[in-house]
Structures are given as structure tokens and as C-alpha cells.
Image: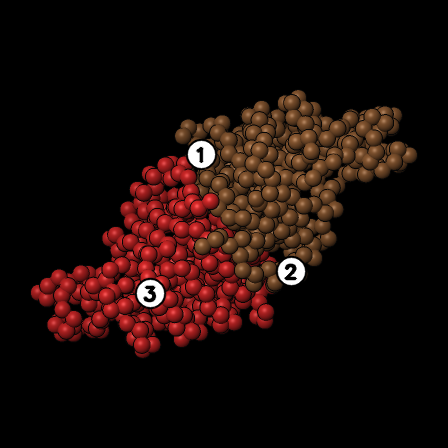
Chain colours: A red, B brown
Amino acid sequence: MTDVLPLGSTIGILGGGQLGRMLSVAASRLGFRTHVFEPGANPPAADVAHALTTASYEDTEALKAFAASVDVVTYEFENIPTSALDVIEALKPIRPNREVLRISQDRLTEKDFLTGLGLTTAPYADVPDLAALEQALADLGAPAILKTRRFGYDGKGQVRITDATQAAQAFAEMKGAPAILEGFVDFTMEISVIAARGLDGSVACFDPGRNVHREGILRETTVPAGIPARLRTDAIILAGRILNALDYVGVMGVELFVTPQGLLVNEVAPRVHNSGHWTQNGCATDQFEQHIRAVTGWPLGDGSRHSDVVMQNLIGDDMDEVPTLAARPGTALHLYGKAESRPGRKMGHANHVKPQQA
Amino acid sequence: MTDVLPLGSTIGILGGGQLGRMLSVAASRLGFRTHVFEPGANPPAADVAHALTTASYEDTEALKAFAASVDVVTYEFENIPTSALDVIEALKPIRPNREVLRISQDRLTEKDFLTGLGLTTAPYADVPDLAALEQALADLGAPAILKTRRFGYDGKGQVRITDATQAAQAFAEMKGAPAILEGFVDFTMEISVIAARGLDGSVACFDPGRNVHREGILRETTVPAGIPARLRTDAIILAGRILNALDYVGVMGVELFVTPQGLLVNEVAPRVHNSGHWTQNGCATDQFEQHIRAVTGWPLGDGSRHSDVVMQNLIGDDMDEVPTLAARPGTALHLYGKAESRPGRKMGHANHVKPQQA
């Protein structure tokens, strides 16, 4: 194993949310320390990190000190300012790499990349101005969704257009942010593949899960997804193509629509992914450890599924269910330690593990 | 759920070794923070704890500040000075309770307690002086083991006596420490039960594991243990009796010898136990989370076993095996982040999970 980080090395994590928290726990299992960089106060990841830097992504000195104190840098979200990455990259390797972030930070660039690989996405069009939006609506038809090119997640920065007459108002809601229009897709279900690629180029995918969203937020992931074996194989091969094309190192979440015409790529997330949380109770190596293994140069672990799992997100008031879930056989709780519950805020998740046949 | 610690509460952990480390990780899953109290530098638990106090157990002010900052106190080892417990108990609940520590800190008291419950232990005798040792050797026969009553672990503070003529020398090796003599037991295997009792008095036991020791240190635990169903039931009932008699709250490790005459209690540990590490990859709720659930007043979790596991301790130079183990299918590594490897030092463990039948 060349380029393997020695035991006791420190992994820098940009972002201190629940993904950083669970990455930090996984790092500890492999004997690594973590240092979390997060602008916000009381980040969930700090409870289980060796060190925390509270500073803005514009604070060059803080970024430099952070980079100097760690051996490799990874991230739990993709919308990190480019300027911050420039500062860090001059000092330490960033995994997954910069090119991956450049692509995934922009919906248009991402879709161009995916279609350039010969993969299918929802029909889309760049809409730099209202005239372009009107043309795109004529081409793609309504309903369609207008989305900001950058900084969108969990349904934010999106406007649904059901009729061409709504074009002007929808465009105004983008407040000048560059946007793309996406045509509607007639899909039977959404699945996702959590895929990993090691520093040595080896690829391993977790079993695809079936996702249910409400109000743009993931609510439930079920494994196995209940799809034909052929689709399962297609999904895994497709994810592998994306990883290889990007010379990717780490875990990626690939959201796919299952349509009568086959699989269609919804979006990719260059990080551990909510729809992969089931792996914590379904596999010997979960997605968080797989990511840590990849970015530290370890061989990928065994992500084969030993149990059937339903992952249930706990969002806002769902936390009222915790006492019931805590007592439910086969249920493993994973709470994020967030002090304040708000509507739409991800507070934790529960993995419901199906008992094995004796 | 009365007496349930609210989410976001802080659990104080006395001792910052690998058990404290894994307890801290488990606490984070349930949304709790931890504060570790440890006299030594760079404790493994600090990498994943919210707060660390580095101070001696004689430092009353540090103990008071620690107790003031937490909501409940637990511990990862049983040999905590009584004076420190006095300071803490005046401020915050200690779970498991003081009586448990009083009993388990002294091999003689522990054996008297166990036999008082009607359980069988190895034959033993108090040996306050050489004459008592000679009498005990005459009664119990040789070979036998002379053990310090207090502060023994991993084979430390023990002298094997193979012949009565060695009595004086063995007694001298105790250096005046109070000791007991234990007769040899003809056992076919050692098993252990990791048992938990909640604040509400409910009891749950993990499946017994079969243990292999070398040089007084646990090397391997295998589940299932390969014992008849009747013995398995006996072991679990026996553990439950001990927990109930102590009004115990938390996880306890109960080491048992399997003999032709039935089960015999070797020793009990009032804490999470090395022989329970397999639960991390064999159950939805592992021993660490079970302990956190108990001491915070949560209901006990589902500790039923979903997989067959062999837990292998990584001791000293065993760490050379890490690159091989890291690449082995079905193997989950748990390293403790200790900077320095020494002979006999527990550096980590590997859980080898047997693939399920499809």
C-alpha cells in the first residue's frame, strides 16, 4: 500500500454537520483523528472530533492553519467556496479532487459531464435569460422544474412550472441566479447507488437502495430495492463509469430514476450520502468508513450487505418518535446531537434491520 | 420513560482508554455528549469525546468541576479510588452504583458475594499471611493461583503455585498486598455473557461467546459459542441473577467456566468487556450503546445476534497484520488510536463476520 496514511494521521473535514460527525466516528475506528472546519457554532461533528476550527471559508489564515494541522482534506458537502479550496490545495491533498467539486457544484456542468459520458439524464436546458426559459419550456414541455445551477440541496432553489405562462414569475424567483430548466421524467422509482473508489482505482458499490422523498427531502431508503438483477447491475456499472471518468477517490452518492427506458441519472453527490446511511447496520464496512478508507489510501472494505434494512430519516418533529423507536426491536438509532429541532431539519435517522432467517 | 436523560445531555466517563473511546462513539449515536476524565496523556477516548479533563483521581477540584459539567457518571474500569467516587457521588449519580464497585474491586469480596448468591466459583481462600496460604494450599491442593485481592487485570498480580514448597516465595511476590488463593478448575472452555440491566430493571443479555486467552490476555471470542442450548440458558439466567442482586444499571461482563459439573463464575467486570466487542458487528445494538442506554435511562436496545462473529484482539505486534486484515472480506477493524505499540498492549480488534447464507 503506497500513499497510505499512517495510523494516527489526522483527516481534515470541511463541514461539521451529521455527515462529518459520522465520518469522524468511522475515522476513529481505523485509528485516525479528525479535525473539523466549520463556520457555524456547535457543529454536530465536534462532539466526536479531535479538533475543531470555527472560522469562515474566507478566513485564509484559519484555512492555512487547518491545512497545516492535517494530513489529507475531505469534505461533507460540495458547495465549498473555490477560494477556500485554493488555499488548502496548496498545502494538502483534497480528496475527492477539485475537478469533481467543479462539476458537481453546477447542475449544468454536471449534466453536460454525465451526458458527455453517454449517460442519460432528465432533459435539460441552460436558461441564461427569460427568452431562453421560454424556448426551453417550448422544447421540454410543462410541467418542468427551474433550478439554480449552484448551491441547491434538499429541494431548495427550485420552482416547479406547470404552465408556460408562469415562466416570467418563476424566472424572477431565481433572483438573477444562473439556472437550468429540467423536464419532467416519468419514473417508476428513485434508487441510489453509493459507490466508492480507492486511491488504487479499485471500485466497490453498495447494494442500490430505493428512495422515497417528500417535499424534496429524502424520507426513506429501502434495501434491497426490489429491482430486477439486470437493473441492479446496470446501476453499479453506471456508477463505476462516473467514478473512473473523474479519477474519483472517496464515496459518491448517485441518484437514479428507474424509467421504462432504463436508468436515468438524477444527480450525483461527491460525498457520503443520506441514502447510504443504511450501510451502518447492513454491512461490515459502512459508507463512512469506506470514504475514510479511500481518502487515506486504505483498501476498500467489504460493503456486502448482511441484512435487509429500511432507513427512516428523522426530520423536525419526527424526533417525537424517538422514545418509540428506541424500544423497537431491530431498530438502530443514529441521532445527530442537534440542540434545536426545526421543520425540515435532519435530526437523525433510524435503521430498521429485518431479522435474519434462523 | 422517567429519569431519562434528555437528548444533548453529557455523560461523564471515568477512564479514557479504548472502552471509553467506544462508549463515547455509542453515546454520540444517541445524541449524547461525553466528557472523559483521565489522568494519562493522549487518552484514546479523547479523539471522540466532546470534552477531556486531564487530572489525577486525587485532584478534588478537578473531580468537582468534572461532576458539575456532566449529567451522569459512568466508568470504563473498576479500580477507581474510593475517595474520587465520594467526591463525584455527592454531585451526580454514578452508574453502575458504588456497591458494585466495592464488590468488584476485591476478588475476595466478589467471590463471597457470588457464592452468597448460591453460584459456584473456583475454590478459594483468604490468605492474610503465609500460614493461611500454606493451609489453603493443603485444602485446595496444587496447582493453584495466588492473586492480589485488588487491582488485578489481564493476568497481572498473579502467581501460579505448582507445588506447596513455593508458598513462601509466591507470598513474597505479593509484596504485602492482600491476596487470595484460587484452586485450579478443570474446565472445557471459558465463555462470557455480556449482560445489561436498564434503569427500569429490565435485563437483556447478548449471546454468550467462547473466549480464548493466552498469557492471561483475551485473544479471541467466538459467537455462537458452540455450547448446548441448556448451558446457554443457564449462563443467561445466572448473569441476570447477579445483575438483579446488585440493582445493577449498565453492562456487565460475566466470565464463566464450562465444567463437567456445570457453569462456574470466573469473574465479573462491572463495565463493557473485551469479550463483548463482537457485538459491534453482530447486533443492531452493541454493548457500548447498551451501556449508554442503561446509564441514561433509555430502554435497552435489541442485542439479538444477526451474524456469526469471531473477534480477534490485536495485541502489540499483531498490528503488523492490519494491512492484511484491512483487505479481508467480512472483517471490520476497530483500532484504538494508540500512538505506541508495546508487547501485551491492546491496540485494536478485528471482528470477522461470517457471510450469511443467501
Task: Note whether B202 is above or below A50 in the view shown.
Answer: above
**Tag on residue A231?**
3
Tell me which residue sits at (35%, 68%) in the image: A234
**Residue B176 in the image, given as x and y percentages of width and height:** 82, 32
Callout 2: 10 Å neighbours few (<14), some, many (20+)? few
Q: Which residue is denoted by mark 1 in the rendering?
A: B299
* Residue A337 appears in the figure: no
Tell me which residue sits at (46%, 38%) in the image: B301
In the rendered structure, which amino acid carries the disc numbered 2? Glu
Of residues B298 and B256, the one drawn nearer to the viewer in this rendering: B256
Counting residues from the start of the chain, the first of labels 2 and 1 encountered is 1
Q: Which residue is denoted by mark 2 in the rendering?
A: B321
Quarter of the C terminus of chain B within the rendering:
bottom left
Distance, label 2 to label 1, CA atoms, is 38 Å
Tell me which residue sits at (69%, 50%) in the image: B345
Given contact means CB atoms under 8 Å apart, are the residues at marks 3 and 1 in contact? no
* Residue A252 appears in the figure: yes
Q: Do labels 2 and 3 share a chain?
A: no
Callout 3: 10 Å neighbours few (<14), some, many (20+)? some
Task: Note whether B348 is above or below B116 in the view shown.
Answer: below
Q: Report whether A7 appears left or right of A332.
A: right
